[in-house]
Image (cartoon, rainbow, N blue to C red):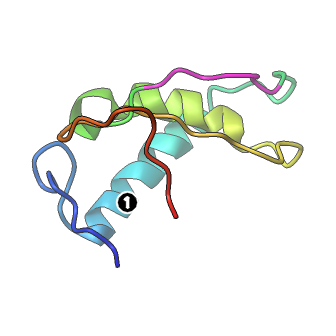
Amino acid sequence: VIRPAAVAGMFYPAGRAELTDMIAEMLMAARDTVPAEAPNPKSIIAPHAGYIYSGPVAALAYARLTSPSIERIVLLGPTHRVAVRGIALPG
């Protein structure tokens, strides 16, 4: 079961195609700024929502994760709408 997006259309486009295009454009622009010899990051702190405001900044961070030598990514993020005691994990 996939939960519908709670804020689609508010901070990012509601339509799948429009959102996909928006993210692709931001990542393409960001990749052009990452030097080929740049080392792989050990950690990244990046904005994760509100693409209309912070998408280009997030894309700069995520563009660093395209190296084929990166084997694992651990993603941590806050809950926004419901308080959680401890940590929430997928099943």
Q: Position of residue 59 (x, y in %)?
A: 49, 35
What residue occupies the far bottom of the structure in this picture? 1
Q: Quadrant of the N terminus?
A: bottom left
Locate residue 22 relative to residue 61 in the image: left or right: left
What residue occupies the far front of the structure in this picture? 85
Instruction: Using the image, determine if residue 43 lies above or below residue 13.
Output: above
Look at the numbered disc 1 and give the secondary structure of its residue: helix
Residue visible at 38% across and 35% down in the picture? 48
Q: Position of residue 28 (x, y in %)?
A: 54, 45
44 within the magenta span: yes
Instruction: Using the image, determine if residue 41 lies above or below residue 91.
Output: above
Residue visible at 69% across and 39% down in the picture? 65
7 within the magenta span: no
Question: Which picture quadrant has residue 4?
Answer: bottom left
Q: Which residue is mark 1?
A: 21
Instruction: Using the image, determine if residue 45 lies above or below residue 53.
Output: above
Does the magenta stretch mainly form a helix, a strand or a loop? loop
Q: How many discs appear?
A: 1
Q: Position of residue 78 (x, y in %)?
A: 36, 32
- 18, 86: nearer the viewer: 86
Q: Position of residue 57 (x, y in %)?
A: 43, 25
Question: Which picture quadrant has residue 70?
Answer: top right
Locate residue 61 relative to residue 73 in the image: left or right: left
Locate residue 30 relative to residue 32 in the image: left or right: left
Locate residue 47 relative to residue 15 in the image: left or right: right
Disc 1 packing (10 Å; few <14; some 14–19; many ≥20) = few
Residue type pointed to by label 1: Asp
Residue visible at 57% across and 39% down in the picture? 75
Residue visible at 27% across and 63% down in the picture? 18
Residue span colored magenta: 40-46
- 64, 7: nearer the viewer: 7
